[in-house]
Image: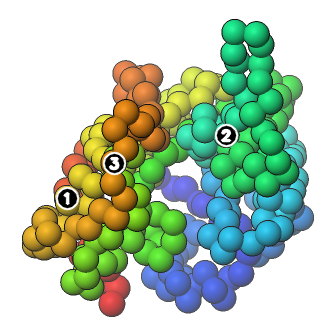
Amino acid sequence: MNLTVTVLLRDTAKFFARYPHLRGNDALRWVEGDLDDFKFPDQPVSHIIHAASVPNLGGYDDWASEHICAGVIGMGRVLKLAAEKQVRALLVTSSGGVYTSVLEYQSESGFVEEVDSMAALTSEKVVYGQTKRMMEIMSAAEARKHGFKLAIARCFAFVGPYLPMNANYAIGNFIRDARAGKDIVIMGDGTPLRSYLYAADLAASLIRMLVKSRSGVPYNIAGKEVLSIKELALLVAQCHDMPTESVKVMTQVISGAPVNKYLADIDKASKEGLLCDSTSLVDAITRTSKWLDQKA
């Protein structure tokens, strides 16, 4: 295809320590720097994929301020690059968090101020989702001004190589414990509903979006197999030949309580041929575990 990909890295040494197989690839160029002040490449740029985002894995108190600044200022820098290089298309990876970050709701008498503290307003759910939405709006405004195509992918939950196994990702923690022969412990009641897409299918979907999606139209990118957290834990146990008794649910289900759902309507992306979902969840879990075997 005669393509060259230029990749922005915060720390080149750390990157190659983690991905040594990419060193020396003639199709890849490397630019070291931060998103808010990196030097633009001298070469022409036809397409941009902006996928940088940092969740608060460390639970830091100042994360909200840092994340908003990085998201907005970094997005502005990417948009300046897009305008200066007169790119054909920009793909922005947004998140399903844009749907879950709205706290206010409307009653019969009008809108209600659901936020009752600064902590609620600066929670990770609100900050992450609202920053993603602002990135969408900023990108749409600049795409309209400069005439480049804008692809917006609202990404949900995924599984595959390089997923952190010691963070706030349930499926990663379940795979970690199953591989270690430990019980899979669910601290909640196991009822929340989720779906997962394999990482390779995510990558294929994003490339399709960059090329084929309608400009300025958000698309949900997510798996189609819906299951509860308890069912997910049982599936992970099954994939690792562990008994069902190894799954422990620590909180009793409250009858009549609303079920937490983080699910996407994927009809639009599917009907327009943008969503690649060729890998079953069983295969996705198995492949992830085998990849960890090879890495060990």
> Where does label 1 land, which residue?
235
- Could you say whether the residue bearing mark 2 is in a helix, strand or loop? loop
Q: Name, please, the residue furthest toward the top.
A: 108
**Which of the two discs, 1 and 3, sits closer to the camera?**
3
> Where does label 2 land, which residue?
101
Q: Earlier in the sequence, mark 1 or mark 2?
A: 2
- Could you say whether the residue bearing mark 3 is in a helix, strand or loop? loop
Q: Earlier in the sequence, mark 3 or mark 2?
A: 2
Q: Is residue 291 left or right of residue 105?
A: left
Q: Is residue 167 left or right of residue 8?
A: left
Q: What residue appears at the point 79 percent right and 69 percent down from the top-left corner? A: 61
- Residue 8: x %, y % from top left: 71, 67
Report the quarter where the C terminus lies.
bottom left
The answer, for residue 90, to whether it is visible in the render is no
| Residue 253 badge | 3
Disc 1 marks a residue whose amino acid type is: Leu
- Residue 153: x %, y % from top left: 56, 39
Q: What residue appears at the point 63 percent right and 86 percent down from the top-left corner? A: 14
The image shows residue 172, relative to residue 182, as above or below, that is above
